[in-house]
Image (spheres, rainbow, N blue to C red):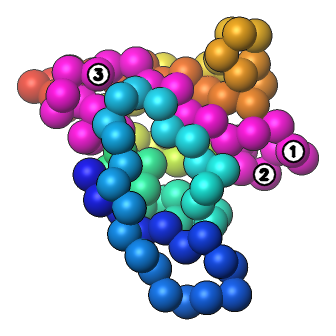
Amino acid sequence: MVLPLNTDPEQEIHQPIELPIDGVLDLNTFRPNEIGGLLPDYLQACRERGILQVRVIHGKGIGNQKRGVRALLARLPEVISFDDAGAHYGGSGATIVNLRPSDQK
């Protein structure tokens, strides 16, 4: 999966990067306005590969990113459930997402 990444917030040029589909999505390298398209696409790519549990790393901060991620997850029909990751997997700085198999809507 190739997605745009802008490493310099002052630059408007987006250079694509290869994003591994391994069940872990670290959002810290993406701008907030990129997440709305990125997260559903990443979850779909995971489902297509049979990865039905995904860890989304959003960081702890003041919680805006986490709230945005969870609001989006709540609207996606392919998401069965989501909750904070365990302490060894990021705790409240990450969300574990359980997905329906790709043959189910």
Q: Residue at x 55, y 34 (%)?
A: 56
Q: Nearer the viewer, residue 18 or 70?
A: 18
Q: Nearer the viewer, mark 3 or mark 2?
A: 3
Write the residue at 67% across / 41% down.
Answer: 58
Quadrant of the snapshot with the C terminus: top left
Q: Which residues are magenta?
A: 43-68
Query: Looking at the image, which is closer to me, 45 or 103?
Result: 45
* Residue at the disc numbered 2: 64
Q: Which residue is mark 3?
A: 51
Q: CA distance from mark 3 to mark 2?
A: 27 Å
The amino acid type of the residue labelled 3 equals Ile
Residue 90, position as x, y percentages in the image: 71, 22
Which residue is at a point 38% across and 61% down the rendered structure image?
Answer: 17
- The circle drawn on residue 43 is none
Q: Are marks 2 and 1 in contact (CB under 8 Å)?
A: yes
- Residue under circle 1? 61
Task: Say which amino acid is labelled 2.
Answer: Asn
Secondary structure beneath label 3: loop
Kindly indicate the quadrant of the structure image that contains residue 22: top left
